[in-house]
């Protein structure tokens, strides 16, 4: 297992981009077997784009799964995709949807209904939601709470990451049960006080997760450094939004990322760094990987598209996230790492609020809630700023927005690719559609976007989930509760 998880850059490339021969064989087999068959649905005339290759082919879908990828297919229903690209549906491993909030707790403004509609509108067909146990709940109780909410409301498929916040009341003995139930990940925050005061149980949790074939997600900001930075700012009265970057400087992320690398190295637990934002933190993962730490990296749209000068704007609260926006040199380092495959995934970290929640008079760096709503526009922005601008290839786009996350979630090749046997989770992508971001059109309940008015080229024309058309031309038409909670494989099968 250790060998399989200690990935040098070459192996990482092979693992995520290999399988080309197998894919070609599947295509040829499809041509031979499927010629006479009639499928439920055929998507014809498009260019099929995966993380490995592109091929002009039709896609035959039966019973919600891809049955063939070959020319000349016939179906009971047919969609003409001439001039369009057909991509695997996006897999966004990092979102925050509210369920029923405990009394007195202000929550994110999307639940599984509006949140998964926003994802679908943006070309995403699977999301991974963070589960926070309420005070006194165990992780399994929180899982059942969110599973019920997702099965009632979700329109696309949902994975869950339970968040370990209090090992005193959330017994680590539950961790193997998650994997048995098909939920193969666990998250914790180095920025939380509980971790800072007593970190040992989190190392034990990582070992338990590793032994159960689970991925450990870590929020890398150091709690002591955060507290000290905030103390200095509050003591000197510098709490206006413009001071936000100083409250969570790069040092805070670098220190925690170095520690996460050491945790990963010592436990050999597969470790996923969420929302990495800086060149310094990237360098710590490089060092960890070079020592054999099994690590993967996620970044998010804000760090690829925006930089810290934004905090000088009068409504700077709308840019607040944890970590904050960084310097232009950090942004450039992230793009290069994404292009090279050192960054594995781009996830929204969708944490939706209303504009007023973020910018009301009197709010300051101690009270502005973190997070933005990006599900409706992450893929179009990544296409426009990444592929159209020449920073990343189409294959890298698919790898970072779908395939790699599907692997890390234990859902590949059911999700994250276009091949016979895979779920028919597809996006018909119009690479020439050019129009600006307008939050007023969002399916999310959030009412603003940090990218309002940005020109974007490349938008989803249609989103298909398990063979059902759930979005056409931006209009979501999906039955509430049609989403499923797929059983995920243990990560040792990566
Ligand atoms: Zn998050």
Image (cartoon, rainbow, N blue to C red):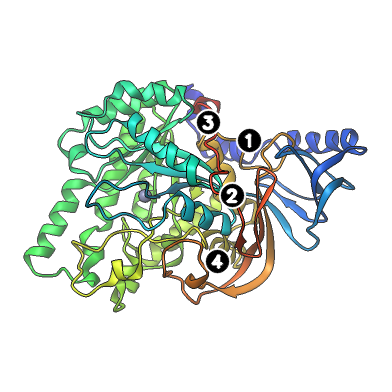
| Lower sequence index among marks 2 and 3 | 2
Q: Residue at x 29, y 66 (%)?
A: 357
| Lower sequence index among marks 4 and 3 | 4
Q: Secondary structure at mark 1?
A: loop
Q: CA distance from mark 1 to mark 3?
A: 10 Å
Q: Is the Cβ of the residue at disc 1 closer than 8 Å to that at disc 3?
A: no
Query: Circle 1 is placed at which residue position?
Result: 414
Look at discs 1 and 4 and give the one toward the viewer.
1
In the image, taking residue 290 as reference, residue 36 lies left or right, namely: right
Near mark 3 (Cα within 10 A), the count class, few <14, some 14-19 or many ≥20, is many
Q: Is 231 or 464 nearer to us in this picture? A: 464
Query: Circle 4 is placed at which residue position?
Result: 385
Query: Circle 3 is placed at which residue position?
Result: 488
Query: Circle 2 is placed at which residue position?
Result: 479
Q: Secondary structure at mark 2?
A: loop
Mark 2 C-beta to ligand 1 under 8 Å: no
Image quadrant in which you'd find residue 269: top left
Q: Secondary structure at mark 4?
A: helix
Q: Position of residue 302 (x, y in %)?
A: 42, 62
| Lower sequence index among marks 2 and 4 | 4
Look at discs 1 and 2 and give the one toward the viewer.
2
Q: Residue at x 44, y 55 (%)?
A: 300
Q: Is 113 or 258 nearer to us in this picture? A: 113
| Lower sequence index among marks 1 and 2 | 1
Q: CA distance from mark 1 to mark 2?
A: 22 Å
Look at discs 4 and 3 and give the one toward the viewer.
3
Q: Position of residue 158 (x, y in %)?
A: 50, 41
Q: Is residue 367 above or below residue 272?
A: below
Near mark 4 (Cα within 10 A), the count class, few <14, some 14-19 or many ≥20, is some
């Amino acid at each position: 297992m250790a060998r399989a998880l200690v990935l040098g850059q070459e192996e990482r490339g092979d693992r995520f981009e290999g399988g080309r021969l197998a894919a070609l064989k599947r295509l040829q087999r499809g041509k031979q077997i499927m010629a006479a068959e009639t499928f439920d649905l055929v998507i014809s005339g498009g260019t099929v784009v995966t993380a490995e290759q592109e091929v002009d082919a039709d896609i035959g879908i039966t019973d919600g799964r891809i049955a063939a990828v070959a020319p000349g297919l016939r179906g009971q229903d047919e969609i003409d995709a001439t001039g369009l690209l057909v991509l695997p549906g996006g897999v966004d491993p990092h979102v925050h949807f509210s369920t029923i909030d405990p009394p007195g707790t202000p929550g994110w403004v999307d639940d599984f209904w509006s949140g998964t509609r926003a994802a679908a509108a943006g070309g995403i067909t699977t999301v991974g939601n963070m589960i926070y146990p309420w005070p006194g709940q165990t992780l399994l109780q929180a899982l059942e709470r969110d599973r019920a909410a997702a099965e009632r409301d979700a329109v696309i498929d949902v994975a869950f990451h339970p968040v370990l916040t209090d090992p005193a009341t959330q017994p680590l003995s539950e961790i193997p049960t998650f994997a048995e139930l098909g939920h193969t990940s666990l998250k914790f925050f180095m920025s939380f006080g509980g971790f800072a005061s007593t970190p040992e149980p989190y190392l034990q949790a990582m070992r338990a997760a590793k032994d159960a074939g689970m991925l450990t997600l870590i929020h890398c900001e150091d709690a002591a450094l955060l507290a000290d930075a905030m103390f200095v700012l509050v003591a000197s009265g510098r709490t206006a939004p413009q001071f936000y970057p100083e409250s969570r400087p790069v040092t805070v992320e670098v220190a925690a990322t170095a520690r996460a690398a050491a945790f990963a190295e010592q436990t050999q637990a597969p470790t996923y760094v969420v929302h990495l934002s800086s060149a310094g933190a990237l360098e710590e993962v490089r060092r960890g990987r070079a020592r054999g730490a099994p690590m993967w990296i996620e970044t998010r749209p804000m760090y690829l598209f925006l930089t810290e000068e934004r905090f000088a704007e009068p409504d700077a609260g709308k840019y607040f996230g944890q970590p904050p926006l960084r310097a232009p040199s950090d942004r450039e380092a992230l793009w290069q790492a994404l292009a090279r495959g050192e960054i594995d995934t781009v996830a929204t970290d969708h944490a939706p609020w209303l504009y007023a929640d973020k910018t009301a008079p009197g709010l300051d760096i101690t009270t502005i809630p973190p997070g933005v709503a990006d599900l409706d526009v992450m893929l179009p922005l990544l296409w426009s700023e990444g592929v159209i601008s020449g920073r990343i290839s189409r294959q890298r786009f698919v790898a970072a927005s779908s395939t790699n996350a599907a692997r890390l979630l234990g859902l590949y090749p059911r999700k994250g690719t276009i091949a016979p046997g895979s779920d028919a989770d597809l996006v018909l992508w119009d690479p020439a559609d050019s129009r600006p971001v307008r939050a007023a059109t969002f399916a999310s309940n959030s009412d603003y976007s940090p990218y309002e008015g940005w020109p974007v080229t490349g938008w989803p024309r249609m989103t298909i989930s398990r063979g059902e058309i759930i979005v056409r031309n931006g209009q979501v038409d999906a039955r509430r509760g049609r989403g499923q909670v797929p059983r995920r494989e243990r990560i040792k099968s990566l």
